[in-house]
């Protein structure tokens, strides 16, 4: 299969490529592009929250007919929040993160020439591309894009009478997501099959780097849960377009009674969160896998408790499928179910705690190499702990009552899955950039990028807990209707300023990323002195990854600073010397 | 404060642009010993920033938090909240300290070899078992509060009130003398009968529709929630109460008000909070604010979601009864 001499046209090499390395880059660049849109939207609606009645030329410039004299309308505010959530969760942190690194690393780290099916892999990317295009197109429809929140609960999302965004914008949202799910399923099935079948000689499951374990388990969660969202989306399309009543019943709106009878919005919530909660881990686990790898490499130490880390990934994955009800404690669901979901939810804290402590122990007595990827990985551990701990409040049905749907929730999930996952993604980009583009990213810009982002992220989300505890609901266009909330206005200004600072800091990353592709210093084969297989491939990309035989694996991936070796790393391809014990 | 942040922002942008021009000249791309040193120290400084931000937020923002609960069930809620938050803060303080301390202390030095330490069964048992025990306690405590709040089967002579949501307004209906709500369905909505009460049901006649919610202190109130169009959520933060209003079904929540509106207005924390709010309002030239309990919508429901509210008045039981008697019944309203 090492047919790297075979002729390629521009189209087969750069556009309809079946090479996992090219597909990975396509995912990354598309993800970054969507990320720019998603982050920019958050800047706009944060301005509205901080300065509700002030006029901004930037809003006038970007929102067109959805603003009046530089002040955005309530409908577009809700649309911006909705599309921000959708883009960041699905397009950036699912496809952009998992799609990029699963594609790049699974074949390279397990010792395979490519994915099990290069063709399906290509189809998966192009479906993702198509769904991205549809999502962007939906921003331009007459009445505005979908605006019922990223959770699109019916009846709001089902009835065009209920809000302008529930017309054409919602139709496009649903079609885009249906295609996205198809893309995600093709990708996930490919990852699972590849990991199970294409590992090189000696690459036992218990020798896989934690990145691969994370991607593998993530793919399984995706296959289990995404189809349920697809069914929810399809049933909602039926309710919207064909008059069925899966989610609708007894509705009187705009002066008339609708014919719907017998459906339940709560059913939709169950279906949505059956994906929606595992989705948190679909986003987070790859970031944790990437971080495990980077922390071990840059600490020059084996990851502490390798088997416990695998165990906790599997435990988290299993539990993630039986906790969805904690989003529905006050939905009208039977309170007994609330008790059950409280129990399963708080159980997740145990494997999460194990992971956090194992990270800390890995750092302990290490020889930390402070590359930008390492900074972001340490940052992830910090936000993962900060955000994870407040889960103890939200996962507890009793305590959830009064903070449900307030800014406390927004602060919690942004820290634990938003910021953490994006840190994992940045860490991955800085670390594997040499593998993707054959060049190095600029270190100093990486440092600036990290520190400004780190300060801004806590500056945004730490105070945000307090306005939530003050009882401020999320998704309010303006807080001026309640004098009760007049004293949170100042806090909102601080949050917005930090948000703009953090958003602006991403310009540093973008500049660094795109300039380095062309002007970065040429990479060495193994710049970080890492053990894993991807660093045994040549810097220049070739079809089939290795010019000759695929190397055999002789040991696990984490023999850093192992006594009895001269170097502080021992690549997985190095045979055990006589009498050496495998860890 | 605001001005400083603006200046910082400008500096950052300038530095970024300046840095971008030097990107082509850089030779070193991998962290050197000097980088390790600087970044390690920066992590220590970041740790200080982190604790500083935590302390600053607690000092500065405690005044904006909700005052103590105004319901009996809410008092249990607050206790559970304090225990949980205390636990979170302790774990947070310790683990974040270790993280930043390790990042500083073990910053890379050339020639030093890291400790090869791949596993310790004992340590892992410790941090599996201790969290398990703590969480078991937290789950049991949490569930006892949850069951207390949600289980209304032993309530003696509760007041039954229906809270009715629609885009973008709240209404309410008291069960009247028989303390039983008449049947209702959106298909009965007509003219002044805005909640779709079924007037052929005998229980409906003495029901009392209102636009302002009054509650008696010390008597358990069982709320029945309905919605006529989309999902809404009835959120009463001062009572630690929230429940979604779902079209097509009736949901329920209950609490016992423990402080009248007057008592809450005189509460120390409320007084301080209201003073602060009025100072801000005075600066903007707005009228003075007097505290009132409020019911707000907390589930995205459309354009005016941010302004869907109803005033709640808690009063002594006899005052409440007088007020209720002065309201018209459904039979009177519809005639």
Image (tube, rainbow, N blue to C red):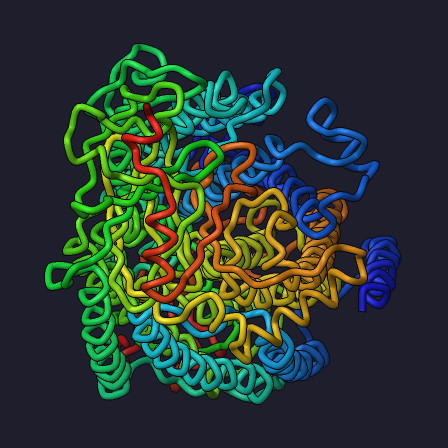
Could you tell me which quadrant the C terminus of chain B lies in?
A: top left
> As rendered, which of B267 and A411 lies closer to the eye?
B267
Name the residue located 70 percent from the left edge and 52 percent from the top edge.
Answer: A50
Task: Using the rendered image of the protein, determine whether residue A394 is visible from the camera's viewpoint.
Answer: yes
Q: Position of residue B49 (x, y in %)?
A: 66, 79
Q: Position of residue A107 (x, y in %)?
A: 38, 45
Q: Residue A254 vs residue A323: left or right?
A: right
**Vertical relation: A137 (above or below) B168:** above
> As rendered, which of A364 and A404 lies closer to the eye?
A404
> As rendered, which of A164 and A202 lies closer to the eye?
A164
Task: Using the rendered image of the protein, determine whether residue A234 is visible from the camera's viewpoint.
Answer: no
Q: Position of residue A13 (x, y in %)?
A: 55, 26
**Vertical relation: A432 (above or below) A175:** below
Name the residue located 46 percent from the left edge and 63 percent from the top edge.
Answer: A291
Q: Identify the image quadrant of residue B192.
A: top left
Q: Identify the image quadrant of residue A189.
A: top left
Name the residue located 19 percent from the left edge and 71 percent from the top edge.
Answer: B144
Q: Position of residue A224 (x, y in %)?
A: 23, 40
Q: Residue furthest left?
A: B154
Name the residue located 47 percent from the left edge and 65 percent from the top edge.
Answer: B261
């Amino acid at each position: 299969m090492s047919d790297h001499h075979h002729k390629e046209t521009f189209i087969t090499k750069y556009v309809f490529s079946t090479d996992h390395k090219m597909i990975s880059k396509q995912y990354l660049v598309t993800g970054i592009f969507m990320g720019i849109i998603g982050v920019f939207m958050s800047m706009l609606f944060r301005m509205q929250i901080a300065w509700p009645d002030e006029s901004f030329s930037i809003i006038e410039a970007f929102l067109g007919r959805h603003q009046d004299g530089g002040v955005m309308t309530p409908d577009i505010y809700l649309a911006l929040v909705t599309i921000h959530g959708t883009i960041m969760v699905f397009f950036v942190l699912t496809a952009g993160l998992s799609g990029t690194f699963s594609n790049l690393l699974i074949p390279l780290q397990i010792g395979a020439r490519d994915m099990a099916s290069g063709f399906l892999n290509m189809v998966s990317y192009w479906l993702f591309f198509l769904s991205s295009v549809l999502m962007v197109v939906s921003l331009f429809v007459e009445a505005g894009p979908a605006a019922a929140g990223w959770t699109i609960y019916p009846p709001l999302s089902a009835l065009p009478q209920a809000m302008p965004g529930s017309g054409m914008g919602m139709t496009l949202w649903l079609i885009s997501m249906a295609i996205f799910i198809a893309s995600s399923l093709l990708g996930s099935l490919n990852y699972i099959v590849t990991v199970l079948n294409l590992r090189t000689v000696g690459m036992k499951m218990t020798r896989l780097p934690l990145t691969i374990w994370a991607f593998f388990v993530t793919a399984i969660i995706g296959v289990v849960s995404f189809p349920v969202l697809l069914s929810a989306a399809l049933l909602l399309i039926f309710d919207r377009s064909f008059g069925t009543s899966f989610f609708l019943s007894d509705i009187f709106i705009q002066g008339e009674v609708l014919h719907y009878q017998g459906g339940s919005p709560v059913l939709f919530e169950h279906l949505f969160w059956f994906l929606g909660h595992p989705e948190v881990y679909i986003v987070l686990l790859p970031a944790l896998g990437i971080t495990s790898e980077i922390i071990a490499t840059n600490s020059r130490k084996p990851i502490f408790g390798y088997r416990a880390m695998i165990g906790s990934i599997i435990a988290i994955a299993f539990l993630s499928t039986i906790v969805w009800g904690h989003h529905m404690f006050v939905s009208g669901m039977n309170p007994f179910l609330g008790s059950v979901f409280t129990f399963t939810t708080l159980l997740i804290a145990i494997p999460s705690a194990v992971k956090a402590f194992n990270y800390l122990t890995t750092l302990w007595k290490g020889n930390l190499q402070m590359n930008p990827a390492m900074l972001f990985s340490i940052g992830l551990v910090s936000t993962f702990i900060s955000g994870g701990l407040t889960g103890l409040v939200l996962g507890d049905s009793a305590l959830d009552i009064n903070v449900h749907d307030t800014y406390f929730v927004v602060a919690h999930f942004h820290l634990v899955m938003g910021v953490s996952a994006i840190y994992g993604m940045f860490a991955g980009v800085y670390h594997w950039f040499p593998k993707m583009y054959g060049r190095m990213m600029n270190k100093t810009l990486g440092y600036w990028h990290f520190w400004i982002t780190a300060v801004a992220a806590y500056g945004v989300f730490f105070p945000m807990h307090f306005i939530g505890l003050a009882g401020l609901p999320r998704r309010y266009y303006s807080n001026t209707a309640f004098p009760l909330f007049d004293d949170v206005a100042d806090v909102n200004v601080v949050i917005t300023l930090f948000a703009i600072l953090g958003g602006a800091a991403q310009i540093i990353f973008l500049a660094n990323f795109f300039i380095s592709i062309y002007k970065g210093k040429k990479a060495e084969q193994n710049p970080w002195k890492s053990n894993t297989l991807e660093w045994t491939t040549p810097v220049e990309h070739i079809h089939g990854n290795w010019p000759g035989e695929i190397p055999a694996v002789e040991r696990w991936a984490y023999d850093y600073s192992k006594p009895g070796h001269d170097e502080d790393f021992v690549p997985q391809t190095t045979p055990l010397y006589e009498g050496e014990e495998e860890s | 404060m605001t001005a400083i942040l603006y200046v910082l922002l400008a500096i950052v942008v300038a530095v970024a642009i300046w840095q971008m021009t030097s990107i082509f000249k850089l030779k070193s791309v991998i962290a050197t010993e000097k980088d390790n040193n600087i970044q390690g120290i920066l992590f220590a400084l970041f740790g200080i920033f982190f604790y500083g931000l935590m302390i600053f937020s607690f000092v500065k923002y405690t005044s904006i938090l909700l005052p103590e609960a105004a319901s009996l069930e809410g008092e249990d809620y607050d206790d559970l909240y304090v225990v949980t938050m205390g636990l979170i803060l302790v774990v947070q303080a310790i683990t974040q300290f270790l993280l930043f301390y390790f990042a500083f202390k073990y910053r890379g030095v050339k020639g030093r070899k890291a400790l090869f330490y791949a596993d310790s069964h004992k340590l892992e048992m410790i941090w599996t078992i201790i969290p398990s025990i703590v969480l078991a306690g937290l789950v049991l405590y949490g569930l006892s509060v949850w069951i207390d709040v949600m289980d209304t089967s032993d309530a003696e002579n509760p007041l039954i009130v229906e809270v009715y949501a629609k885009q973008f307004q709240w209404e309410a209906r008291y069960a009247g003398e028989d303390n039983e709500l008449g049947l209702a369905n959106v298909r009965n909505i007509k003219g002044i009968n805005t909640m779709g009460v079924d007037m052929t049901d005998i229980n409906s006649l003495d029901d009392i529709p209102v636009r302002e919610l009054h509650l008696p202190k010390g008597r358990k109130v069982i709320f029945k929630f309905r919605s006529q169009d989309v999902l809404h959520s009835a959120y009463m933060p001062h009572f630690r109460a929230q429940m979604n209003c779902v079209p097509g079904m009736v949901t329920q929540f209950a609490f016992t008000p423990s402080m009248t509106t007057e008592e809450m207005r005189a509460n120390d924390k409320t007084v301080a909070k209201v003073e602060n709010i009025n100072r801000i309002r005075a600066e903007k030239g707005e009228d003075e604010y007097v505290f009132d309990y409020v019911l707000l919508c907390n589930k995205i429901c459309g354009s005016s979601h941010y302004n869907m509210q109803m005033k709640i008045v808690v009063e002594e039981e006899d005052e409440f009864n007088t007020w209720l008697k002065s309201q018209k019944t459904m039979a009177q309203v519809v005639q």
